[in-house]
Image (cartoon, grey):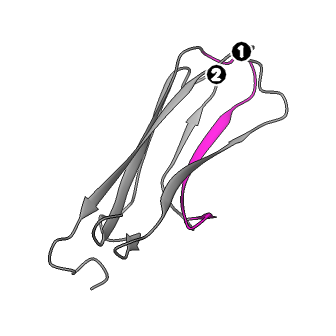
Amino acid sequence: MPSAGSVVGLSVVANAAPSAGSATFSVHSAGTELVNGPTAVVDSVNTTDSEGLASSVRQHTFAKGARLGISATTTTNLAATTVEYTAILFVRFDQHGLAGA
């Protein structure tokens, strides 16, 4: 990341709904999922879109240069022949360096 800040949430959109199973999306930092971080689940209830928010804007902070991303985990019974997902990570940059305060 170009500046220090905090994770606000993520949003996921799928081009098709699964008829069974689920796909769970989580935020990770340096390859490790954030503990109690925001998640989004696409399943038979949230068929094509889902969002997850952090419980607090400063709950998950990161330093300048942090490598953030979104990981996906699916259940073994995910029934979707071809599904494309678009995932967006929302962060809040802290130009004054107070993200860890």
Report how far apart the C-alphas of labels 2 and 1 lie in the structure: 6 Å
Q: Quadrant of residue 58?
A: bottom left
Viewer-proximal residue, 81 or 46? 81
Residue ID for mark 1:
19
- Label annotation for residue 44: 2
The local secondary structure at tag 1 comes to loop
Residue 86 x/y as whole percent? 49, 30
Say what amino acid the circle numbered 2 marks: Ser
Q: Say which amino acid is labelled 1.
A: Ser
Instruction: Magenta stretch: give its range.
Output: 17-33
Left or right for 25, reference 57: right
Q: Position of residue 66 (x, y in %)?
A: 43, 70
Residue drawn at the location 33% of the way across and 66% of the way down: 6
Q: Identify whether 52 is placed above or below 1.
A: above
Quadrant of the drawing holding the C terminus: bottom left
Is residue 27 covered in magenta?
yes
Count of marks placed on residues = 2
